[in-house]
Image (cartoon, grey):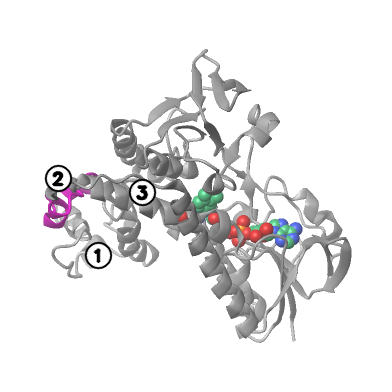
Amino acid sequence: MKKIIIIGSGPAGYPAAIKLKQSGADVKIIESNTFGGTCLNRGCIPSKAILEIAHRYHSIKEISDFFDPEPHIKPKWEKIKEHKTKVVEGIRTSLEKFFSMKKIEIIRGKAKLSSNKTVEVESGGAKSSYEFDKLIIATGTKPFYPKPFDSYKDFLTDSDKIFDIENHPKRLTIIGAGVIGIEMACFFNAIGTEVAVIDIMSEILPFEDQSITKVLKNSLEKRGVKFYLGVKTSDIKIKDGEKTLILENGTEINSNEIMVAAGRTADLKELNLEAAGVKYSKFIEVNSALETSNPDIYAIGDVNGISLLAHSASKQAEIVSENIMKETKEEFDKNIVPNCIYSFPEIASIGLNPKTAKEKGINTKTKKSFFQVLGKAVATKQTEGFIQIITDESDTVIGAQIVGGPATEIIHTIALSVKFKMKTKDLNSIIYAHPTMSEIIAEALNK
Ligand SMILES: Cc1cc2nc3c(=O)[nH]c(=O)nc-3n(C[C@H](O)[C@H](O)[C@H](O)COP(=O)(O)OP(=O)(O)OC[C@H]3O[C@@H](n4cnc5c(N)ncnc54)[C@H](O)[C@@H]3O)c2cc1C
């Protein structure tokens, strides 16, 4: 029986453990923190739990004049936190029960490599050693603090701490206009916090198509979010609970909380990767079959830096489990990963956009339609935004970008066509139910 050790129980580690156990391997999974990783405890799940509350709160306000008396409601921070904790703990308990039912051993403690065949785990001062035939490193990432924020770490908040801050902040400054920063800006703005977002880059979400992100930025600005883009921070002043961010151009921004959302970093030094000859720089180096420089060791999920998303992590877990059990070399295809941003309005994209296609020397055609032409969008007050479907010259679908509506759901129809290299006529041959927001695909293709 193959002896497999997995370090890390996030969306990379735990699906690999389940799959490998189902395939008959002897599996042990090591976790130093709460089971379920960043995604369940400090990432996707808590953020979506609170974003949904903000979304529904916003919807109630939007239709309040249909009621007599008009509902006058305001958010309760303690209750929001309680809900988030209940959701996270509920899922974690189910997951741990499932592992116990399937008899998959969970080892609690901090793991590091001690040779190219052994892992050492330290827990409460005690050390144990475990041998492996194959090792999967799935240790994820943690919030990154660039200068000068690293010197003020204890006084600032980040995505590990924001869901548990004591009070509902009146004013919040977010450093970083990436996915986490923007989602948190949407949430806090919706529950009445004054939000400022600062970024050294001149655009928000710079890896997304700018025609899409422009819609979101305008929408957030209309709702009162202030953006300071293309600027550097020179210092921070903290006095009597007031936190002031000083920008290089002299602007001072006061707030109750400063959240650092300036990217994520992998903690690789502590894994002692040298003991097994595993090469790394910022992330662990892997080939397209997710093998490290040591052929018995794989690195999956955030820790390899290919795509810092939970669904990429889980797909990589599936691929590596198959590769280990069947001795194959299936590869992970980054091009078919949907990128979803749970902002208001939502953003979702897949494959190439006009700019990235051009960089690859591909001539493109763009088919575009706006949500406002759909009956469902008008009836449900979701008219903001549009879709653009990108094809090559032979009409093969190579990508799409959506802003508005349930973009993060609609994207999957396009994902199928990108994955199977479908032509626009194939994508248009299915019947889109009426009235739905997915009709936007047919609207775009029929133009
Ligand atoms: C606020 C926020 C919102 C997010 N929202 C989304 C979203 O909506 N959709 C999405 O796809 N992604 C989202 N992400 C990203 C997603 O959480 C990560 O991509 C995903 O968790 C990566 O999974 P992973 O298994 O590689 O690592 P992690 O989930 O980080 O898990 C790694 C685990 O390894 C453990 N570990 C580390 N070192 C050791 C060691 N030496 N010994 C033992 N255990 C160790 C850690 O404690 C951790 O539990 C979000 C992230 C954040 C922070």
Which disc is residue 65 wearing? 2
- Element at label 1: helix
Q: Is residue 158 left or right of residue 397?
A: right
Local crowd size for mark 2, using a 10 Å CA cut-off: few (<14), some (14–19), many (≥20): few
Q: Is residue 142 left or right of residue 418?
A: right
Asked if residue 362 lies left or right of residue 393, the reply is right
Q: Nearer the viewer, mark 2 or mark 3?
A: 2
Tag 3 residue:
54
Based on the picture, tell me whether residue 325 belongs to the magenta stretch: no
Q: Which circle's residue, 2 or 3, is located before the other in the chain?
A: 3
**Residue 295 in view in this figure:** yes
Cα–Cα span, label 1 and label 2:
40 Å
Magenta-tinted stretch: 366-386
Q: Which residue is mark 1?
A: 427
Assign ligand 1 to one image quadrant.
Answer: bottom right
- Pointer 1 local density, CA inside 10 Å: few below 14, some 14–19, many at least 20: some
What amino acid is at disc 3? Ala
Q: Residue at x 65, y 26 (%)?
A: 148
What type is the residue that disc 1 sits on?
A: Leu
Nearer to us in this view, 93 or 403? 93
